[in-house]
């Protein structure tokens, strides 16, 4: 009986020695893969909103718009020579909770972070919905965009008082 | 033991048996009987010759056994302890003076010395003895471990572990998923005028992509340019 107990203990010990590292490895794998799961369950996104005036008065891109400088040299923005930052907003947008933002033009932008999916943090795919109403509350646009975390959405075309064209740029990242 | 089957003193002029002679040669007779045998031997030349022969045979047997014991100790070291115990017991039986407790203590002495000696040799010896004593259990454990290992290798989800490992080459499918993708406009509704969708691809790893929605009002669309 004692021999049987000892043999059983030896088998249990051997299994524990083998199963523990395997379990640890699986947990490690899940931990690594867990980033994906965490991103899918991201509850909020950090969003930067730039209000920009494009014109041909003067020259150059506002230093505050450095992250957008390359894009502003490409069509359709290459039609203008000067880009000036009118206002910058940094907001944390909770998932499925619309951010309503008053713009310098009097228009209102609503931004809805619908969720995120993907692999590495820098390549997390975000799903955002925009609605843009004019200063009278009349809906001008709504749409949904899928883009990588950190990519920009630029909405433009409206004329701005005093000359120039109004552009709003939005970039969101998942922490 | 005497020829008459008793150890009592013999009468003068009586003869003694071969067994008495053998006991006398081995010094096993009581003192008074040994004296009687000695007196008898003094008067019997044939008995003296027989006694001498017995002594020579006994010496030959002892020498042979000692030689065999020495050889066994050299060739089979494990017998050394066993022989020392046997010898001590033989001496104990022969002398009849050693107390049983002392004999037992002496029998245990080699083991105690090994256990208390300390140091790497003693420790290693203890480990070796443990493995020798539990050879069956160790073998069972090793076989079980091998079987479990084989099962894990055969059934384990190796793919997940490979993806998790740092420094390993990523799976091509996984790499495609992780690659940067251009922005996509899922749906767009422009209520006044029209919208144009453009995509700006990132120029490098440190650059980001952009989706451009350009709104043109109806007035602008209807405006005719100079001809």
Image (spheres, grey):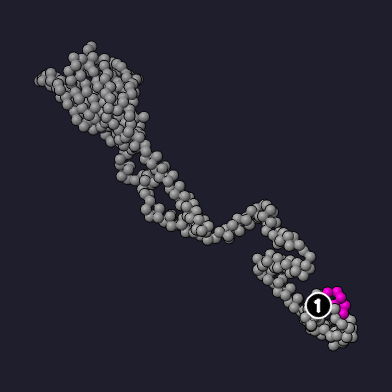
- The image quarter containing residue B129 is bottom right
B166 up-or-down from B62: above or below: above
| Magenta-drawn segment | B30-38
Indicate the chain on which mark 1 is placed: B
Q: Most extreme residue toward the bottom, as rendered?
A: B46
- The image quarter containing residue A53 is top left
Front-most of A95 and B10?
B10
Instruction: Please tell me which residue is depicted at 30% across the width and 28% down the height of the picture.
Output: A95
Spot occupied by residue B15 in the image (x, y as percentages of width and height) = 84, 85
Instruction: Please tell me which residue is depicted at 87% across the width and 80% down the height of the picture.
Output: B36
Q: Is residue B84 magenta?
A: no
Within-10-Å neighbours for mark 1: few <14, some 14–19, many 20+: some
Dominant secondary structure of the magenta stretch?
helix
Mark yes or no: residue B137 visible: no
Spot occupied by residue A43 in the image (x, y as percentages of width and height) = 33, 29
Mark yes or no: residue A175 visible: yes
Front-most of B49 and A56?
B49
Instruction: Please tell me which residue is depicted at 46% across the width and 52% down the height of the picture.
Output: A15
Q: Is residue B34 magenta?
A: yes
On the image, numbered disc 1 is attached to which residue? B7
Instruction: Please tell me which residue is depicted at 50% across the width and 56% down the height of the picture.
Output: A5
Secondary structure beneath dot 1 equals loop
In the picture provided, is B110 more to the left or to the right than A154? right
């Amino acid at each position: 009986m004692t021999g049987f107990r000892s043999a059983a203990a030896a088998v249990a010990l051997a299994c524990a020695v083998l199963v523990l590292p395997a379990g640890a490895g699986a947990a490690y794998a899940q931990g690594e893969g867990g980033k994906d799961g965490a991103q899918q369950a991201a509850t909020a996104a950090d969003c930067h909103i730039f209000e920009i005036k494009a014109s041909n008065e003067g020259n150059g891109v506002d230093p505050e718009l450095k992250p957008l400088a390359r894009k502003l040299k490409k069509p359709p923005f290459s039609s203008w020579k000067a880009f000036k930052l009118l206002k910058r907003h940094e907001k944390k947008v909770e998932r499925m909770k619309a951010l309503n933002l008053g713009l310098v033009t009097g228009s209102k932008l609503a931004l809805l972070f619908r969720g995120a999916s993907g692999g590495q943090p820098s390549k997390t795919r975000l799903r955002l919905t925009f609605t843009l109403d004019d200063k009278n509350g009349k809906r001008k646009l709504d749409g949904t965009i899928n883009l990588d975390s950190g990519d920009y959405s630029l909405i433009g075309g409206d004329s701005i008082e005093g000359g120039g064209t109004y552009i709003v740029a939005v970039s969101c990242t998942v922490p | 033991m005497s020829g008459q089957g008793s150890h009592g003193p013999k009468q003068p002029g009586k003869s003694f048996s071969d067994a008495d002679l053998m006991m006398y040669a081995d010094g096993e007779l009581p003192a008074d009987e040994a004296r009687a045998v000695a007196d008898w031997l003094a008067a019997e030349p044939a008995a003296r010759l027989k006694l001498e022969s017995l002594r020579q045979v006994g010496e030959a047997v002892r020498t042979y056994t000692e030689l065999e014991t020495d050889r066994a100790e050299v060739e089979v070291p494990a017998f050394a302890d066993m022989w020392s115990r046997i010898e001590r017991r033989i001496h104990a039986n022969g002398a009849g003076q050693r107390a049983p407790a002392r004999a037992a203590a002496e029998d245990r002495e080699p083991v105690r010395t090994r256990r208390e000696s300390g140091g790497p040799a003693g420790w290693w010896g203890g480990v070796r003895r443990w493995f020798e004593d539990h050879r069956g259990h160790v073998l069972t454990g090793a076989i079980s471990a091998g079987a479990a290992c084989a099962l894990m290798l055969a059934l384990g989800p190796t793919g997940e572990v490979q993806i998790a490992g740092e420094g390993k080459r990523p799976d091509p499918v996984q790499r495609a998923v992780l690659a940067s993708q251009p922005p996509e406009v899922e749906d767009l509704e422009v209520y006044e005028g029209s919208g144009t969708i453009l995509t700006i691809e990132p120029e490098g790893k440190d650059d980001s992509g952009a989706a451009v929605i350009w709104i043109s009002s109806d007035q602008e669309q209807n405006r005719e340019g100079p001809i």
